[in-house]
Image (tube, helix red, strand yellow):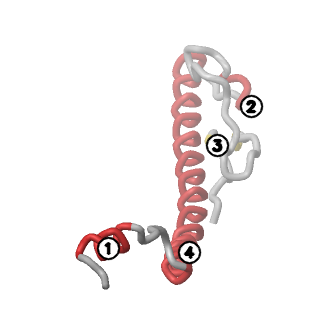
Amino acid sequence: MYTKTDFVLKSQKRKTGFSLLELLAVVTIMGILVVIAVPRIATHAFTAKVQTCKQYKGDLNSALERYFFDKGVFPTKVSDLEDPDYYPAEIPRCPADNTAYQIDTNTHRVTGHDHY
């Protein structure tokens, strides 16, 4: 016959851990979350690069205007802006497609890089 202490000891000896079904459920849920999240992250990464490109274009166009106000002529190439008075850092490249920025000699603005 079993005593009360025998029953307590048997229930305390139960093994703890995950069953195969619990593990499968967790892996399935994580897989669904990954399928939802990865495309969104990739899209947001490209959008961030395009927005950074627009910011660089605006900064370079401002530097072009400062160059014109100081010298009286517009620069013919972007590398002319490599001066702490006009563009204090290294001239950037487009983060979306890694191309160099060019100046349109007719409009005196940075051209291209619309990324549509």
Q: Residues within 10 Å of mark 4 (few under 14, many from 20)?
A: few
Q: Which residue is mark 4?
A: 27
Of residues 110 and 24, the one drawn nearer to the viewer in this rendering? 24
Q: CA distance from mark 1 to mark 3?
A: 84 Å
Of residues 115 and 112, the one drawn nearer to the viewer in this rendering? 115
Q: Residues within 10 Å of mark 1 (few under 14, many from 20)?
A: few
Q: CA distance from mark 2 to mark 3?
A: 10 Å
Q: Which residue is mark 1?
A: 6
Q: Residue at x 60, y 63 (%)?
A: 42
- Of the image marks 2 and 4, the number of the one nearer the N terminus: 4
Q: CA distance from mark 3 to mark 4?
A: 49 Å
Going by the numbered disc 3, the residue's amino acid type is Val
Q: Which residue is mark 2?
A: 77
Q: Judge left or right: residue 13 versus residue 76.
A: left
Q: Is residue 26 above or below residue 107?
A: below
Tag 3, which secondary structure?
Answer: strand
Q: Which mark is residue 110?
A: 3
Locate the N terminus by quadrant: bottom left
Q: Is residue 93 above or below residue 41?
A: above
Q: Is residue 84 above or below residue 91?
A: above
Q: Residues within 10 Å of mark 3 (few under 14, many from 20)?
A: many
